[in-house]
Image (cartoon, helix red, strand yellow):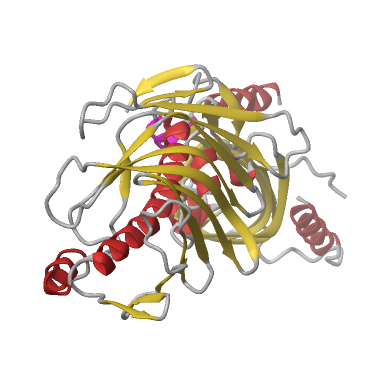
Amino acid sequence: MKKLIFSLVLAVIGLTVTSCIIEEGSTPPRETQAGKVIFNYSEQFISNNLVLVDIAIKINKFSETPAEQKNAIEDRFFPQFKPRATGNTWNLQNSNYVVTTDGKSLETVGAKWRVNQYNDFFVINIECIGSKQWKVTSQMSFNGQITGYSDLTIKALLPEISSGAALFDYSVSGSCNYYAYSDNSISVSCTIKELMKFVLANQQSYYKASSRFYAAGGKIEMVVTNINDSDSEKRDLIIADLSSSVGTNVVNRITFKGVTQVW
Amino acid sequence: MVFATFANSQERIRYAGKPAGKSIKKSFPIEFDFRVSHGILPITYDFPENFLGESYYCDVAPPTIENEYYGAQQYQGNLYSTGSLNLSHSVRVKKWLEVGAVLSYNGSFRNIYSTVDHSVITTDNRHSFFFTPTIRFAWFTREWVRMYSSVGLGVGVMISDDPQFRNVTFHEKEIQFGPSIQLTGFGISVGKSVFGFAEAGAVGTLGLFTIGIGYRFKPVTKSF
């Protein structure tokens, strides 16, 4: 019997230590990957505002262009979706953009325009506050629930690449907030600390799905809060510093939980 | 084990019930065996995830900002498995038939690390226990070698960590109950009282391939 017990114990010990790897671990992301994720979403959120502002500015240019030059402007900025006015409302034909004006040029101080996308899914109000300078407030909602809003000041800059559909690049200041609702909801609050420069990402017309502006300068702070977490003090601060960027050569230093890396 | 003991007692009753003076036509001595074995590739309740990868679940829904954000803050270490550790007891009630039961344990262990400082922030460990009554059919029996097939059906439980959404602050145990099934196509044992054995072509909770050692003996019975 002793022999039996001894053999069994030996066998169990032997088998227990023979565990093996059945799946390799995943490759570790970079330390600031989570910060980059939030930066990308924040950049996209601001870019969405700029795309609509850019549409309004191009419609304004189209409306002020002499009749004999309108076709050239239309072909350059609106090759597929022709802008057509009914009173003070402009529609881009076969698109989901509607631009409502107050009858004034968007470059007249005090002029107030409104751009609506997807039937109030995304609405921005634009007010001219100076020479090629606008105050932009926006609200994004889904199923009656606000998913984001922003309060930005935008100034037109000469574009880095002046050909194609690019009319202006933009410098941006202000703040924005957006939410992701789920079992693990988070909110992101962004504050632009140093004037950010946004450049049109491609030279296609803005109505292409891939059209967007990308950040190529400035500094932004983003605070991520878990809405469901009872500990409201538990927030993550992310800083993206693009001030070392030169032209379209972007140097993005992202700081997340005390670690800074260049992206 | 209960199953084996029941079978054993039935066999004793049969022998004890023979009228005195009449010889048993072909007496067969009961034989016990104990086995310890190790199986690889057992089927546990996380089988689809382990064998098809996490994408089996994750591809269904598009990534969301919160999943991307929390997902980027941690990463998975290697997944270790003990394989199936089995302890069995059976009773040979006929030359070709053994009944018994197997107790099995299978553990898989994985650390989840912080992306920022690479410390362990949580674990994804799973412990499976199975109780599987089995019937073993020996279709080749010699003094030193036996070949057999077997079938088993029982119950099991898997206790696992459940890191929801990979959020380190939310962590609880999940318990799953289910059946335990074992079909062994081919098994061979070599030896007499102490023997080694191997099983292949098996599907179930004991593992696809199993090796082990065992000890068999005949109980001392009182003669009347």
Left or right: residue A228 versus residue A62 is: right
What range of the chain is rendered magenta? A19-29
Decide: is B63 above or below B34: below
Q: Answer whether residue A186 is visible to the viewer in this image.
A: yes
Q: Quadrant of residue A158?
A: top left
Q: Nearer the viewer, residue B204 or A40?
A: A40
Q: Nearer the viewer, residue A201 or B47?
A: A201
Residue A82 image point, x, y percent: 25, 76
Q: Answer whether residue B200 is visible to the viewer in this image.
A: no
Left or right: residue A121 versus residue A208 is: right
Q: Nearer the viewer, residue A197 or B190?
A: A197
Decide: is A143 above or below A164: below
Is residue A183 rendered magenta in the image? no
Residue for point 33% across, 23% down: A243
Residue for point 78% across, 38% down: A230
Decide: is A125 above or below B172: below
Q: Main secondary structure of the magenta part?
A: loop
Residue A189 image point, x, y percent: 58, 39
Residue A211 image point, x, y percent: 28, 56
Residue A192 image point, x, y percent: 48, 32
